[in-house]
Image (spheres, rainbow, N blue to C red):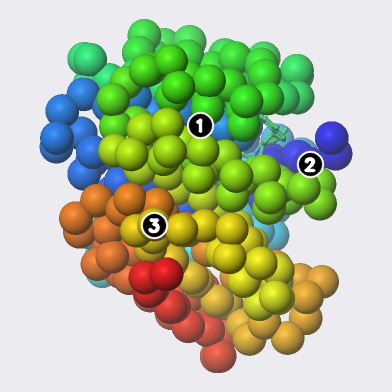
Amino acid sequence: MNYRHSFHAGNFADLVKHALVLRLLRARQAKGPVTVFDTHAGAGLYDLTGDGARSKEAEAGVLRLMAADGLPETIAALAAEVRAVNGGASETRLYPGSPLLVARALRKGDAYRGFELNPPVADLLVQALADHPYADGRPGDGYVEALAGVKSGGGSGPLVLIDPPFERPDDYVRAAETAMAVVRADPKATVAVWTPLKDMETFDGFLRRLSGEILVAETRLRPLTNPMKMNGCAMVVLNPPAGADQAAQEICDWVAGTLGDAGARAEVWRL
Ligand SMILES: C[S@@+](CC[C@H](N)C(=O)[O-])C[C@H]1O[C@@H](n2cnc3c(N)ncnc32)[C@H](O)[C@@H]1O
């Protein structure tokens, strides 16, 4: 368990993921109270100066976001959250992970259940959520715990976030199998899975394990020619709510267009 999300916090992939999560949450809240299950919660809040200097990934991601003008609405909503977490300061020292972003948006009747396998990170998660009464973070295997929560009827039509580190070879299979098991257990569930884009074969193999109504939102920073690099990322959404396609297009277009190389592009499509 070597993965440390703090090295990557606030990178382009976090911006795509978190802008879309905020929009999916808002769409689901419009229908009534929602429970959010987060299989891989992480620490909840990241100090971008924690390991000395800011990471190059944050510099190329959230710091460019915070310096940009004329943001489209979906991206502006994330920038507003980052600014609020930093107390409105002009310097961006802190970056919120999915637990804190969701927790801050919860209303009475909503709930957040986040799981983290790495005990010291789970301690940070509990700390990050301490002021949020509707949010609960705990140690555990999120694939197992979130599915158990959905099966036990923990909130009809939940929003389930699956965001593995993909450091283990079985993460693609477990992510796909968990996503399918969730929608079998509750056909009204919306499931959002984040994956890196390295090479097309790995991504296709993942998509082949899925079926149903599925939105695929790809942000390619560069052509997928070097499979050793994260050349982009994808959000794959099972049972996407109305408006998700347009929101995903806006988010992926902005990130690819602003943070990508000359050959960058966004591809938003239905499986
Ligand atoms: C990409 S980070 C999560 C980031 C978080 N979702 C966010 O958006 O802020 C992945 C996290 O999953 C944790 N992890 C790995 N395998 C896990 C599992 N089976 N269940 C729960 N957490 C796991 C890692 O320790 C790491 O902190």
Q: Residue at x 55, y 53 (%)?
A: 194
Residue 14 in view (yes/no): no
- Seen in the image, is 70 located left or right of residue 223? left
Residue 144 in picture, x, y percent from top left: 62, 25
Q: Is mark 2 within 8 Å of ligand 1?
A: yes
Residue 31 in picture, x, y percent from top left: 14, 35
Q: Which mark is residue 9?
A: none
Q: Quadrant of ligand 1?
A: top right
Residue 234 in picture, x, y percent from top left: 52, 63
Determine whether the residue tagged by mark 1 lies in a helix, strand or loop. strand
Residue 119 in view (yes/no): yes
Determine whether the residue tagged by mark 2 lies in a helix, strand or loop. loop
Q: Residue furthest front?
A: 184
Determine whether the residue tagged by mark 3 lies in a helix, strand or loop. loop
Q: Nearer the viewer, mark 2 or mark 3?
A: 3
Q: Disc 2 versus disc 1: distance between alpha carbons?
A: 17 Å
Residue type (three-letter) at the residue carrying disc 2:
Tyr
Q: Residue at x 14, y 37 (%)?
A: 30
Give the residue number, with chain letter if any, for mark 1. 38
Q: Nearer the viewer, mark 2 or mark 1?
A: 1
Name which of mark 2 and mark 1 comes first in the sequence: 2
Name which of mark 2 and mark 3 comes first in the sequence: 2
Residue 1 in picture, x, y percent from top left: 84, 35
Residue type (three-letter) at the residue carrying disc 1:
Asp
Q: Is mark 1 within 8 Å of ligand 1?
A: yes
| Image mark count | 3
Q: Dividing the image into 4 quarters, which one contains the C terminus?
A: bottom left
Q: Residue at x 50, y 71 (%)?
A: 219
Q: Residues within 10 Å of mark 3 (few under 14, many from 20)?
A: few
Q: Which mark is residue 3?
A: 2
Residue type (three-letter) at the residue carrying disc 3:
Gly
Give the residue number, with chain letter if any, for mark 3. 212
